[in-house]
Amino acid sequence: MSNVEDVLELGARQPDNVEKTNAYAEEDAPGTAEPSGEVEDQPATLARRTRMSGRFSHIWELFERPDPRSKLQNPLTLLRLSPRQAYTFSVAFLGWMVDAIDFFCVSMSTTELGDAFGVEPSRVTSAITVTLMLRPVGALVFGIVADRYGRRIPLMVNLFLFTIIELASGFSNNLSTFVGLRAVYGILMGGEWGLGSSLAMEALPVESRGIFSGILQEGYAIGNLVAAMMYYAIVPNLGWRALYWISIIPAAITIVLAYFLEETDAWRQARQAQRASSKPYHIIVLDMLKQHWARCIYAVVLMAAMNFLSHGSQDLYPTFLKKQHDFSPKQATVGTIVGNFGAIVGGMFFGYISEYLGRRRTIAICSICGACFIPLWVLPSQFGQLLAGAFFMQVFVQGAWGVIPVYLSEISPEGFRATFPGLSYQLGNLVSASASQIEATMGERNPLPELRDGDQVPNYGRVQGILMGAVFCCVLVLIVVGREERGKSFTQSTKIKS
């Protein structure tokens, strides 16, 4: 198989040294996964998958009705985990939520930081840019360490350093110091997602991955809500420095919980296979890149489009409400909160539904439906209508995102389940870091025809609508041409050729 075919045939065939099994007929290793439900008829499934031959047959399969043997299970049943599974997932979720809390603390306190450092708020946002730029470094470093030495210790180190940086940020006396600290934080934030995602997906029952993927990803939206509540409770009373000092409490709790984690059986098996090989680890990495370089590029491009989707729909929207529609900061905050509730609902629902519809089909549906809600999102002038648009836009944007942790984990090359998802996610994030800047610049260059108090009014809404429409189309095309490995076993023995 050529490397280009690796993208189009993603998941269709495994290397000769990996046994391909179906998730719903797979019995996971004790203590790692506890699948439930009926065993699927594998001969019938194989016949269905090979009914159409050819390189592009998977595209047509996307438009077929779901396999009748794939039943939509009771979500309450899927939410039942063993104590070990629940504990592992909780630590992964808290780690991602803690990162989001701190990230949004900066964006919410830019005015106070500018006043304290004697600069314009626009200069403070350079700290956010630096954070986004350095996230791929953390994804690479912590991903490689986690894949080779385990997830537990790197996660604890990541969170410990995070608390130090967060505490020091509250003592910053000038912008340069603050930006430097946020640069280190960017490395740590980039490393956490891959650690938490691999830890959670490997520990969960196969049939529960979808719904918990949505819950895990929306730890980011919940972190945003927590940061907003902390900001309004702390900053007016104690100042911006106390916001950073107090926000280390959730991180400290998560470090203690991470201390009692156990490594997943999936990682143990992958590590045993690596140790059994006579090849040095760097040669194993190079072999993976030679075999799967096209898959890696595909994942980065897909993540760039997905990050444009989230940043393009979230970052500038409060400014759009305040500047273009002249709503108050309080109303803009309400709009952000309503959007986050939509994100939480969408992430959990579509993550759950992806176990029945499939990962790609679910993301495709979210892309189509999200594009349909663009007019309600940007065109109305009434606040209530715009709130409805914000809610439904985030339902579908984060509905697609809710599938991403499990999708990337399942298409990851064996033995690289922390590095592959984390690095592709953060490289895509780096590409999309300019989304809000593009929207702001184009909106200001193309103002509304009418003036307000003698000044031009930026037309952010039109630019946001056009950008989001284009990005939804890109995501749809990318997800159609890709493959998925829904239900892939993470615990089967994998041999690495010497």
Image (tube, helix red, strand yellow):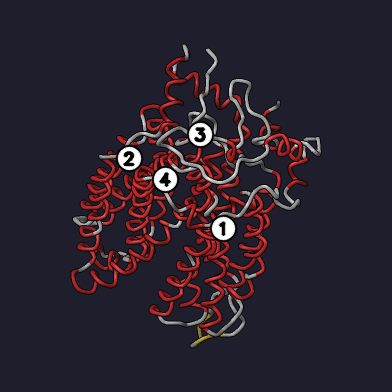
**Depth-wise, is mark 2 or mark 1 nearer the camera?**
1
Q: What distance separates the C-alpha of mark 1 from that of mark 4?
A: 20 Å
Q: Earlier in the sequence, mark 3 or mark 2?
A: 2
- Above or below for 143 versus 273: below
Q: What distance separates the C-alpha of mark 4 from that of mark 3?
A: 19 Å
The amino acid type of the residue labelled 2 equals Leu
Q: Quadrant of residue 351?
A: bottom right
Q: Which residue is mark 3?
A: 490
Pick the residue in front: 496 or 22: 22
Q: Which residue is mark 2?
A: 155
Q: What distance separates the C-alpha of mark 3 from that of mark 2?
A: 20 Å
User: Which residue is at a point 36% across and 55% down the rendered structure image?
Assistant: 97
Quadrant (top left/top right/bottom left/bottom right) for the N terminus: top right
Question: What label sits on residue 350 in the rendered view?
Answer: 1
Q: Which residue is mark 4?
A: 193
Q: Count residues near mark 2 (Cα–Cα under 10 Å), then give few for <14, some for 14-19, many for 20+.
A: many
Say left or right for 143 vs 309.
left
Q: Earlier in the sequence, mark 2 or mark 4?
A: 2
**Depth-wise, is mark 4 or mark 3 nearer the camera?**
3
User: Which residue is at a point 60% across and 29% down the rendered structure image?
Assistant: 292
The amino acid type of the residue labelled 4 equals Trp
Q: What distance separates the C-alpha of mark 2 from that of mark 4?
A: 10 Å
The amino acid type of the residue labelled 1 equals Phe
- Above or below for 206 versus 442: above
